[in-house]
Amino acid sequence: MNTPLKRLAASVLAVLAAPAGAVQLDYTLELGLLHSDNINLSEDDPVSQNVAIPAINFSLRQEGATVQALVRGVAEYRNYLGNAFDDELRGQLDGIVNWTLLPERLSWTFQDALGLQPINVLQADTPTNLQQTNVFATGPTLRFRINPVLRGQAELRYVDSYAEETEEFNSRRWIGALRVFHDLSATAEVSGNLQTERVDFDQDGLENYTRYDLFARYTSHLSQFDLDAALGYSRFNYRHRDNRSGVLARAMLGWRPSARSGFTLSAARQYSDAATDMMADPGTIGSGSTGIIIGDTSIDAGVYLEERLELAYAYTAERLGLRVAPFWRKLDYGQDTRGVDQRGGGFNGELSYRLRPQLRGGIVASAERRNFAGLDRRDDDTRYGVFLTQQWTRHWAWRLDLLRGERDSTGDGVNFDDNQVYLRVSYTR
């Protein structure tokens, strides 16, 4: 893989070199057998195939005085037993490592996001249409106190983005930021933020640009409510194209009406691009489910205006578990022809029930509609199924999934349906 991942590996080794007992490492070893009656996701020529999938899921946490880290990753090897595709190694990783050089003054951060993304977002997610992508960032953060309730922070980051197949995604970026925080109370603060970003693409013929962001942010954390809201302005300066600018607005509201349930409502109107979209929020690292998730980002060099609205609800009881998350999203590339304008929405959810002390079953479902502006195309993707899982012992477990996926599209030759049976046995440390 690209050198940025090697840099992250070096930072992980630095964590492991910390004093004994300071690092918490958890992992799950898994061996799975997948059967699909349409492994190539074809409309008129489906291929039935069995796939052997050994995998490892791991999480690493360090909360020392000098090094703080949270790294979570998945790696799996897919052996296509009928040779429908070449065997492949897939990986996904989100991690952040913070190295304190001067307590409460100076630190150095390493952050990495390794993912699996489509080469062409208009085609099905078959092995020949997938690629590994990596976004790596590193740099110092300087903190300083102005008065008892006012403090400042200066940041500098170098960012390297890389894709296996899509060369126009590859870039080098320098990001600088200056932030001033005012403590309103023990649970709330307001900040002013000035940020600039210089993007240089590796591929000839792509126009580099400079981005400026100026915004105010308010955060509050109470026993039942969390609020994080930002409002400001973004501007993109080009040399040979019209500049682009507009309002930046983000908000997230969390509400926990009880110890067992919680709502999260988030909305955004902001400019973004594929590399920025893929870099995980450090606050969400380690909160996702196990397994590699194939992304839906269009891997290109384009800048788009994103409008997004999401609602998530989760309920966890002794026997019953429920999670449902509807969403709506719009991507507008404007005059930037390197991307495809999209508008769509859908939901994903899971309902589970504990049948016995160590046996749980449930249903999963997701649906999404995407309209591709300018292409006169609409895709309706649905996926649903049932699962059964049992914890044999403290370390050993198994899980069986019966899944069906469908695509109903107005495009030519891209419809498909796929039925899968997936059996896994796992050992958790």
Image: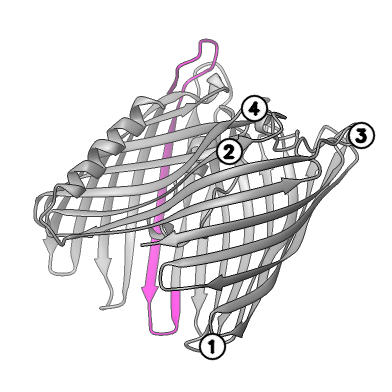
User: Mark 2 or mark 3, which has the lower sequence index?
Assistant: 3
User: Mark 1 or mark 3, which has the lower sequence index?
Assistant: 3
Question: Distance from label 1 to label 2 (Cα)?
Answer: 36 Å
Magenta region includes residue 75: no
Residue at the spot of label 3: 44
Question: Distance from label 4 to label 2 (Cα)?
Answer: 37 Å
User: Mark 1 or mark 4, which has the lower sequence index?
Assistant: 1
In the image, residue 176 above or below residue 222 = above
State the residue in front, 383 or 374: 383
Kindly state the secondary structure of the residue where label 4 is placed: loop
Numbered badge on residue 137: none
Q: Are marks 2 and 3 in contact (CB under 8 Å)?
A: no
Magenta residue span: 200-226
Residue at the spot of label 1: 318
What is the three-letter code of the residue carrying label 1?
Glu
In the image, residue 191 above or below residue 248 = below
Kindly state the secondary structure of the residue where label 1 is placed: loop
